Image (cartoon, coloured by chain):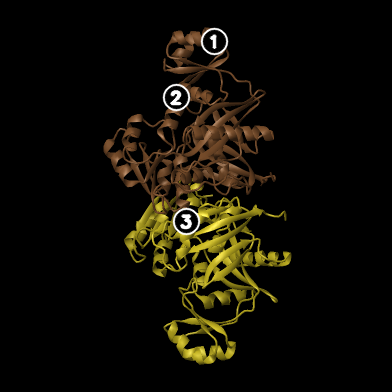
Chain colours: A yellow, B brown
């Protein structure tokens, strides 16, 4: 099959952050080269890739040269300008494809898509004007969260409404951007499934991890998650339904709320996902290699987990704990090569080995 | 301590082969940058490092610039020209240090050193002339192996003598290089210990692996090795004695023959070692990270093994098995990014997960 990349081929990655860096290392393990495209200077992935282009997403010449140098294109974040994608797609395959990007770039479209598959989401109401927001609050009630439809991540572009009087303030807080109002979901905890779909349509999911957020940013993922056997099956099946419906190729993060009424999909991310970092030390084939395998047309790993792992993010000044963490023999350190530890900035993570996975 | 390198520091690696490549990735995980120095064009490590210098080992200008750009220097192979080491050592610390290099670069010195520690080696006789070789054969008997004292690896520079009439042919086969004649050791199998010593003098060893060679090249390493509890202890203790006696900093491979009379040291390698590749999938902190930790003055991992692993080298055309191997979910592929699969060339390896390590 011409779609299967041989070792020595080159994968282009849009975005040079830590996800691109870890994707590059995974590609290297498979004998594949990586060319990273990133507008910012000195990106984390630039320290561990074969080639790096530093250029903006509206530089058509740079985009064309990048495409010409690679065999397939993938990305480490979903907010890539459409014009760049249009140009690149005319030259090389982009995996995962445009439909997944379009759906996940817009919170209203994403929820409508998920509901179309029969999956539960938070109640939501699309908001384009302050009047819409009044109507949305009347419909959904408070408390609720107003989220910009596009370009949100790690809690950015979100404001909470605790009562209807806060409509105007909330609308100004998001600068009147197109948004959705989401109702609160009563959940006991959050889990996520790292799902993968190969070019051949095969689907493989990693065991769900249990996530704890702090200040809107993932703090910890633990495997195994607290889930009943049937919840675990449900989680994996619904993630499979999502990637199949999108004719998806690659790894997707699917965040789920565990509620008394079953699993509710919080959001999906069409890329490797922070809540899947535990796979680096818990699986033979981790999420980064799984994504590269899918994008390169290789067979997927089956997602089997051999160990119980606790992943903890090192955010901002957390990185000052590195000397202490380095002395722990049960803990794998993964640092991203970022020089400056700004508040809220993801500097690295640790995977702590908890023991062999219980036999299933 | 000024000797402890902070994340963001740069490690210089002499040699750009697969060992340098995997060292570079391990350094990257710890947030360290890597500058590789390698005479050959397009080395495997060049695809996954921060900086690459392509220059010969007698290019003093390039060596000086390399040294100026790094905080500490290590190496992935032991046959670095002395003149290059002399220059580099005047500018930056080289770890492991010169004594280990000197001892391991010369088979006669190595065996004399090991015997000085009270360790068993094969009987040997230093050979500088054809007359010496006659004397050596008279002393040691046949069968025996004539090995060049320097620059041997993977069975190169070796010739077997099955009877005394072969002295002249053997002497010509190694072109009259300084050599040692080694007597055969009756052994049941070979194991190796990957030992590490930190800058603070702490010693940690990985569990011994059992090695099988084919055509003089390592084919397979399996953990756990077939060893009694007391043999396992002996193996680890003697490896510890070696690294401590050399005031060693870094990872060392120690190959041992298992005989009815106890463990016999075959040879030592002052670097990460092919027989330690299983640690990438069997341990939280693998041999590459362990070496970087030592060289960077970080605390060592303790070498704990969480899984049973079988490592198999992909030599030459073995790499054609990649499509089949890629379909095995229990198998981690590690390819080295080499374009051409020449006979005897190490193209990659696989680590097959056999199950959780038995509780010790």
Residue at image location 29% in from the left, 35% down from the top: B59
Q: Which residue is mark 1?
A: B139
* x and y percentages locating residue B108 in the rendered image: 47, 21
Is the residue under label 1 in contact with that under label 3 (CB below 8 Å)? no
Residue at image location 45% in from the left, 51% down from the top: B28
Mark 3–mark 2 Cα distance, whole angstroms, equals: 39 Å
Mark 3–mark 1 Cα distance, whole angstroms, equals: 57 Å
Q: Tell me the tag on residue A83.
A: none
Disc 2 with disc 1 on a shared chain: yes
Is the residue under label 2 in contact with that under label 3 (CB below 8 Å)? no
Can residue A286 be seen in the rendering of this structure? no
* x and y percentages locating residue B230 in the rendered image: 67, 33
Tell me the quarter of the image containing the C terminus of chain A: bottom right
Is the residue under label 1 in contact with that under label 2 (CB below 8 Å)? no
User: Is B143 displayed left or right of B151 in the figure?
Assistant: right
User: Is B359 displayed left or right of B201 in the figure?
Assistant: right
Which chain does the residue under circle 1 lie in? Answer: B
Q: Residues within 10 Å of mark 3 (few under 14, many from 20)?
A: many
Q: Nearer the viewer, residue A25 or A56?
A: A25
Q: Nearer the viewer, residue A140 or A203?
A: A140
Q: Which residue is mark 3?
A: A335
Q: Which residue is mark 2?
A: B106
């Amino acid at each position: 099959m011409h779609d299967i990349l041989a070792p020595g081929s080159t994968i282009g990655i849009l975005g040079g952050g830590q996800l691109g860096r870890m994707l590059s290392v995974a590609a290297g393990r498979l004998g594949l080269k990586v060319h990273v495209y990133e507008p910012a200077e000195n990106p984390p992935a630039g320290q561990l890739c074969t080639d790096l282009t530093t250029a903006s997403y509206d530089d058509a010449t740079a985009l064309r040269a990048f495409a010409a140098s690679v065999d397939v294109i993938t990305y480490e974040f979903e907010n890539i300008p459409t014009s760049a994608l249009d140009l690149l797609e005319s030259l090389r395959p982009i995996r995962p494809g445009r439909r997944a990007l379009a759906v996940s770039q817009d919170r209203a479209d994403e929820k409508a898509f998920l509901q179309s598959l029969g999956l539960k989401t938070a109640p939501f109401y699309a908001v384009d004007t302050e009047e819409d927001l009044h109507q949305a609050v009347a419909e959904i009630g408070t408390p609720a969260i107003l989220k910009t439809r596009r370009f949100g991540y790690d809690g950015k572009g979100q404001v909470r409404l605790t009562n209807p009087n806060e409509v105007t303030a909330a609308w100004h807080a998001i600068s009147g951007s197109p948004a959705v109002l989401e109702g609160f979901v009563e959940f006991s905890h959050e889990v996520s499934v790292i799902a993968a779909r190969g070019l051949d349509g095969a689907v493989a999911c990693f065991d769900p991890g249990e996530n704890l957020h702090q200040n809107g940013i993932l703090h910890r993922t633990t495997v195994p998650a607290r889930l009943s056997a049937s919840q675990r099956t449900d989680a994996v099946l619904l993630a499979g339904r999502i990637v199949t419906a999108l004719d998806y190729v690659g790894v997707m993060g699917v965040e789920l709320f565990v509620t008394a009424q079953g699993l509710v999909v919080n959001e999906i991310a069409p890329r490797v996902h922070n809540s899947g970092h535990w796979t680096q030390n818990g699986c033979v084939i981790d999420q980064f290699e799984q994504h590269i395998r899918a994008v390169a047309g290789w067979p997927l790993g089956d997602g089997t987990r051999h160990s119980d792992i606790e992943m903890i993010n090192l955010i901002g000044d957390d990185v000052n704990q590195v000397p202490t963490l380095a002395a722990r023999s049960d803990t794998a350190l993964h640092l991203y090569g970022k020089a400056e530890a700004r508040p809220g900035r993801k500097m690295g993570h640790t995977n702590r080995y908890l023991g062999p996975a219980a036999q299933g």
